[in-house]
Amino acid sequence: MIPGEPSRTAWSVAMHRAAHQIVDGASVFADPVAVPITGWPSRRVADDATQHPERRPMRAFIAARHQFARQVVQSVARPADGLQVVVLGAGLDTTAYQPDPPTGLHVFEVDHPATGAWKRDHLARERIAPTTRVDYVGVDLESEPADAALHAAGLDPSRPVAVIWLGVLVYLTGAAVESTIAAMSRLSDARVDLVLDYPEPADRLSEHAAAARAARARRVAGIGEPWLSSYTPTAMSGLLQHHGFGVVEDLDSADWVKRYFGIPRDRVPGRGGAHLVHAATQLTG
């Protein structure tokens, strides 16, 4: 990470979200703030996307994972309780800046302090203001537990919490992944719903999918953000269960491609790959 600049991968994700609105017509994930938050005009976003057709699969995955997270949060929202949403590795996430937010929504954006500070400056430059209550919590997930910082920032442990943790796990060591899952399980005495994505190990992929994975891994390593962690579905389920989470859903790439793009499972190459997970504590409570 370069001081005074955002995570390069966080910026890339924001550009994919913006391009999805314009190039794909927001066919999976509609976000009216996705383009404005980049600071780029729509034409520039569109031109950049069309000049790089190789980005289309990643753009599709990012759209799907954000829609998956949105649907989970909507499904567990309890209006009487208000809604506490924690966004881990928030980057340029737009949850707290949407028009007509749910009543009582309280968003906690957790990110590396440098990225969080850059985002606040960027939002001020682009004149984008929160539309609901938001607290910015500076935490380095590789070395700090997030639960204590969140409680100190005002998260209420007596109320349910929804955690969105997308595009981050792969960049953490196994020890940091486990400590973060453990910290999330301690956020609430009521219930914690956790949405995350994870990649399967490369040796479980097809030759073509493994080669594409390796090429992308080399690119992000080259900008100083290497991929460090991957899991089999069995290993991820075991890790979550060890820390009190039950798996509600674990979608592999064929599952989410079918759900969000209508393509049958048997037509999806390189099945396995990137997974989308919804897990929760207190499933029987």
Image (tube, grey):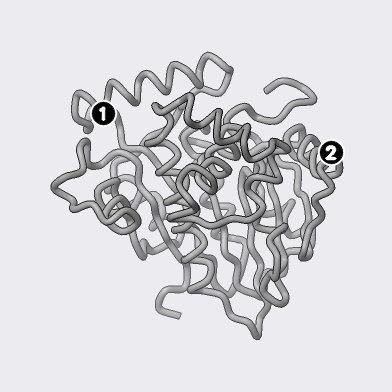
Label 2 Cα neighbours within 10 Å, binned few <14 / some 14-19 / many ≥20: few
Task: Tell me the amino acid under the disc marked 2.
Answer: Asp
The residue to which callout 2 is attached is 121
State the CA–CA distance, disc 1 to disc 2.
Answer: 38 Å
Q: Secondary structure at mark 2?
A: helix
The image shows residue 31 at horizontal and vertical percentages of 59, 55
- State the residue at coordinates (68%, 61%): 98
The quadrant of the picture occupied by the N terminus is top right
Question: Is 247 placed left or right of 203 in the picture?
Answer: right
Characterize the local packing of mark 1: few (<14), some (14-19) or many (20 or more) Cα atoms within 10 angstroms.
some
Mark 1: secondary structure: helix
Residue found at x 70% / y 44%: 37
Q: Residue furthest front?
A: 43
Q: Earlier in the sequence, mark 1 or mark 2?
A: 2
**Is 186 placed above or below 235 here?**
below
Left or right side of 3 for 171: left
Q: How many marks?
A: 2
Quadrant placement of the C terminus: bottom left
Q: Is residue 275 left or right of residue 101?
A: left
Q: Disc 1 marks which residue?
A: 209
Residue drawn at x 44%, y 16% is 218
Q: Quadrant of residue 96?
A: bottom right
